[in-house]
Image (spheres, helix red, strand yellow):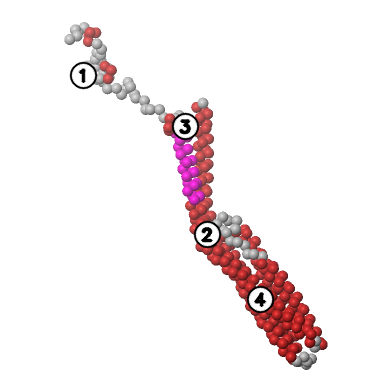
Amino acid sequence: MKTIARIISWLVIVISIAGILFSAVIITGAWLVNEQFTQELTGILTGLQSGLEVIDTSLERLDAGLSSARVTAHTVQEAVGKLGEQMEQSNPVISVLAKNVNEDLVTKINSARETLLAVRDAVTAFNNALSAVSALPFVNIPALPNDLQNIADRLADVALLVQQVRSLVADVKAGIVETLIDPISQSADQIDQDLGDIQAALGAFRERIASAQEQIAALLSEIPVWIDILSISITVVFAWVLLAQLGLVFISRGYLKTGFLPWSLPPARQEDADLRSPNAGGVAAPLDENASTGGEMPFVGDASEKGEEPE
């Protein structure tokens, strides 16, 4: 039975030493990785923030382009009004109208569509990168909505309407058709309204971007603190594990030396014969051979054995 207990003690020592080494490695690694992990994560969030700034700048340019397109639509409406007053083939208003529609309005709408599609792809890439970062427990940034696809579809409808106005203006320029004045005016007014709705949708989307930027900025200031707290928590937990394993090593080592566990040690035994005093139990302490008795051992015993009468 004692042999089995000693084997178990050795196993406990070996496992405990392995646990001590493992805990020490974990504690050391928690602080070695701390700074690197902080730098990498803050770098990723800084990249996301920069991406949002690029997206917002592109949407700002897009909004400016749409405002310019609305100004052109108003110019078309004014030109159509002037054209209705005097329908002549040589009227210079027709040339101005054709230029505003064929060159300015078409170019601005097509440019806005290209910019919007590029921004849509950038938002998709941003959401993919954000989904990877959001796997961390302390990162909770909502993805940007997929509203740009709907806006792109509405802008495509506006582009079709612009092409219709372009065809109507070409007919007017070719045949001076008075009946086409109202359709051109109504289409220009519809283009202006649609572009206004698109701008409102872009404004709401930019508000979502601003909110995401604020959340990322807050995370950039909080992440180093959270990572330090995580490192401290790991240190406390594994320091406790290390001390517990160290205690098991001492307990097992003590058992191998004494054969007893600390809580089952027997009481200390009193040494009877060698540590008794001379008056204890009627037995005197031994004398030195070179004492004054001349080398003879003194008689120890009962007085009657020496032939003396007891008093």
State the residue position of label 3: 256
Question: At 44% across and 33% down in the image, what residue appears?
Answer: 254
Question: Is residue 293 visible to us here?
Answer: yes
State which tag comes first along the sequence, 1 or 4: 4
The answer to whether 59 appears left or right of 180 in the picture is left
State the residue position of label 1: 292
Q: Main secondary structure of the magenta part?
A: helix
Secondary structure at numbered mark 1 = loop
Secondary structure at numbered mark 3 = helix
* Image coordinates for residue 151, horizontal then vertical, percent: 68, 70
Amino acid type of the residue tagged 1 in the rendering = Ser
Give the CA separation, mark 2 to mark 3: 49 Å
Question: At 68% across and 78% down in the image, what residue appears?
Answer: 192
* Image coordinates for residue 210, horizontal then vertical, percent: 57, 68
Q: Which residues are magenta?
A: 233-257
Place residue 213 in its image quadrant: bottom right
Circles 2 and 3 in contact, beta carbons < 8 Å: no
Question: At 62% across and 74% down in the image, what residue appears?
Answer: 60
Q: Using the image, determine if residue 106 lies above or below residue 123.
A: below
State which tag comes first along the sequence, 1 or 3: 3
Give the CA separation, mark 4 to mark 3: 87 Å
State the residue position of label 4: 196
Secondary structure at numbered mark 4 = helix
Secondary structure at numbered mark 2 = helix
Circles 4 and 3 in contact, beta carbons < 8 Å: no
Q: Nearer the viewer, mark 1 or mark 3?
A: 3
State the residue position of label 2: 223
Place residue 125 in its image quadrant: bottom right
Q: Using the image, determine if residue 99 lies above or below residue 9.
A: below
Q: Nearer the viewer, mark 1 or mark 4?
A: 4
Q: Nearer the viewer, mark 2 or mark 3?
A: 2
